[in-house]
Image (spheres, grey):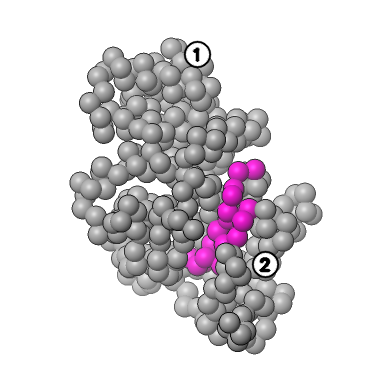
Amino acid sequence: MNSLIEISDLTVSFPGDKYRLTALDRVSLTIRPGETLAIIGESGSGKSVLGVSILGLLPDHAEVTGSIVYAGKNLLHASYSEMESIRGRMIGWIPQNPKTGCNPSMKVWKQVVEPQVTHTDLSRADARVRGMRLLDRFHVVPSDYWGDQYPNTYSGGMLQRAMVAMGVSADPEIIIADEPTKGIDTINKNSIVEVFSELKTKGITLVIITHDLDFAYRLADRVAVLYCGQVIEITTGQTFFANPRHPYSQALLRSLPRNGLIPIPGSAPPMHAEHAGCRFKDRCSDCREECTHAMPAFSLTEDYVRCIRYDNRNQAC
């Protein structure tokens, strides 16, 4: 299977006075051309750190090892100017909070076309036309009125759609969206689903970082589950929502209202904790002695799961 981005053994940590916080621990993940990949997990699992790692937006004090290969280049070794040429143009970004992701002193149409203006010689007049067309495309209407307004006049749903328009402005081949439905009501969520469904039909590769399982259910071709900085399951969206393998994945689905709203017992360990064995073992009802040992990700055809119940190391080839 072809890969558009190949992430290998990515570890991201943040040194502090008392602790070292490890947000991602040897994450390996393939992003395929044209797919919608949902990266899910509880808050603090490392989802957003993974997104900003791809974009080269980690703070200077972050310590990073591993590789993120895109277009034959390890982005972790790319220069500032090289990343500037990739961000927005090749890889679009939709931040988690559109209200803080927008410039409050700039009209919305100017922000929508900023990625294209940055990467092309688009004139101001053409940029305005392009900005209004993008707002029309994503149902921020009438665009000739709303385009000339400032972000503080927008509702949450409208501003989220404007941020999607900004993300596609320069026609990137990949869009990374961080919690695109956060703080959005049901009606506006449906409109966001429609927007992302349209992007899917255009063949754009989507990486959706979310803890909104309903949103992932409606869009994801594949699902990668993060827990305590580790990828613990990778599978198709259909398999994840019908028959997840990892106990944590199963617990996530049981916590949905339609499945009884059963909470996951306990809480995830802090990022500075040292781990031995499965990181979910203290919350798992099926914990065994083997779960205290190192836990690799076991391969199940094209799927992977980090659980001793799927140990296939001793099976004949």
Point out the frontmost of discs 1 and 2: 2
Residue 195 located left or right of residue 89: right
Q: Position of residue 212 (x, y in %)?
A: 61, 47
Residue 265 located left or right of residue 163: right
Q: Which residue is mark 2?
A: 245
Measured Cα–Cα span from mark 1 to mark 2: 47 Å
Q: Nearer the viewer, residue 101 or 199?
A: 199
Q: In terms of secondary structure, where does tag 1 sit?
A: loop
Q: Which of the 4 quarters of the picture holds residue 251?
A: bottom right
Can I make out residue 233 in this image? no
Task: Tell me if label 1 and label 2 are in contact, CB under 8 Å.
Answer: no
What span is colored magenta in the figure? 218-237
| Sooner in the amino-acid sequence: mark 1 or mark 2 | 1
Q: In terms of secondary structure, where does tag 2 sit?
A: loop
**Residue at the location (54% across, 35% down)?**
201
**Residue at the location (23% across, 48% down)?**
82
Q: Is residue 135 above or below residue 230?
A: above
Q: Which residue is mark 1?
A: 142
Q: Residue furthest front?
A: 317
Residue 225 drawn in magenta: yes
Q: Is residue 244 above or below residue 284?
A: above
**Residue at the location (61% across, 56% down)?**
236
Q: Position of residue 13 (x, y in %)?
A: 37, 66
Q: Which of the 4 quarters of the picture holds residue 300?
A: bottom right
Q: Position of residue 315 (x, y in %)?
A: 62, 84
Mark number, residue 179: none
Q: Amino acid at mark 1?
A: Pro
Residue 35 located left or right of residue 265: left
What is the count of numbered marks? 2
**Residue at the location (37% across, 20% down)?**
130
Q: Position of residue 269 (x, y in %)?
A: 54, 70
Q: Amino acid at mark 2?
A: Arg
